[in-house]
């Protein structure tokens, strides 16, 4: 990436970033032309290629920007220092709902990118996802008091079950074509209450 991109005024940088999110969130990676992104950003295609050498570079930059902004929101909502797993998850959900409302195209982009199968970028997305989010999750887990869960619970399997359920839900949202923040918040609240009823130790 051309470092001159970062010397642009913030308003111009955000216009390019948001244009990328808008186009990629509405199409597959393959069907998102740089020409359309440039038009949405109000710049020429040649200038967009001046800042980003190719579409893959722009896509991965948008993904990394999204990951960094998401982690910043999760940190702001104090999601990584809670002793209670579900309190941490509730704070995380609140942070992500705020992101969806504030950056709707970025939220749609993130979900589509997570399931993108184009061989040109899917391996890089998977590696980046684990680098950003598994590290944070692993650091957070050490704070969770195992006494909060029912005796004998396979905690690793619980994490996997919740991950698989969440992944399946997001895939369903992708098939619908757009993220409905209110519906997503309602559904995840129901899931959290269900998981609490199964996994938390009864007082």
Image (tube, rainbow, N blue to C red):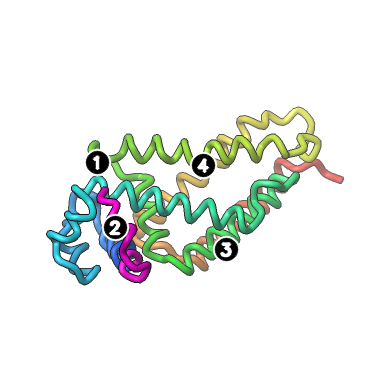
Q: Tell me the distance, in whole angstroms, between the alpha carbons under discs 1 and 3.
A: 32 Å
From this view, report whether residue 153 is shown above or below residue 7.
above
Q: What's drawn in magenta, residue-wise?
A: 1-14
Please name which of the two marks, 3 or 2, marks the residue nearer to the observer: 2
- Find out whether residue 9 is within the magenta segment: yes
Q: Tell me the distance, in whole angstroms, between the alpha carbons under discs 3 and 2.
A: 39 Å
Please name which of the two marks, 1 or 3, marks the residue nearer to the observer: 1
- Residue at the image position 24 percent from the left and 41 percent from the top: 118
- Residue 138 x, y percent position in the rendering: 60, 35
Residue designated by label 2: 5
The residue furthest right is 203
From this view, report whether residue 152 is shown above or below residue 23.
above
- Residue 64 x, y percent position in the rendering: 39, 48
Residue designated by label 4: 133
Instruction: For the residues labelled 3 and 2, say whether their Cβ atoms are less than 8 Å apart.
Output: no
Element under disc 3: helix
Element under disc 2: helix
Instruction: For the residues labelled 1 and 4, say whether their Cβ atoms are less than 8 Å apart.
Output: no
Q: Tell me the distance, in whole angstroms, between the alpha carbons under discs 4 and 3.
A: 24 Å
Element under disc 1: loop
- Residue at the image position 51 percent from the left and 41 percent from the top: 133
Return the disc, 4 or 2, that comes first in the chain's sequence.
2
- Which label number is shown at residue 186? 3
Element under disc 4: helix
Report whether 161 appears left or right of 131. right
Report the front residue among 43 and 96.
Answer: 43
């Amino acid at each position: 990436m051309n470092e001159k991109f970062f010397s642009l005024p913030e308003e111009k940088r955000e216009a390019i970033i948001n244009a990328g999110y808008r186009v990629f969130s509405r199409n597959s990676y393959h069907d998102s032309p740089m020409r359309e992104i440039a038009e949405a950003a109000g710049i020429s295609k040649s200038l967009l290629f001046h800042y980003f050498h190719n579409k893959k570079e722009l896509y991965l930059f948008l993904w990394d920007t999204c990951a960094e902004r998401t982690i910043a929101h999760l940190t702001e909502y104090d999601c990584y220092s809670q002793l209670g797993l579900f309190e941490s998850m509730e704070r995380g959900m609140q942070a992500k709902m705020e992101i969806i409302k504030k950056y709707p195209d970025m939220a749609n982009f993130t979900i589509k990118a997570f399931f993108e199968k184009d061989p040109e970028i899917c391996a890089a997305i998977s590696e980046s996802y684990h680098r950003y989010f598994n590290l944070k999750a692993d650091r957070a887990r050490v704070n969770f008091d195992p006494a909060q869960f029912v005796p004998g619970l396979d905690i690793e399997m619980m994490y996997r079950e919740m991950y698989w359920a969440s992944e399946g839900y997001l895939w369903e949202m992708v098939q619908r074509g757009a993220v409905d923040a209110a519906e997503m918040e309602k559904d995840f609240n129901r899931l959290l209450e269900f998981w609490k009823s199964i996994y938390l130790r009864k007082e």
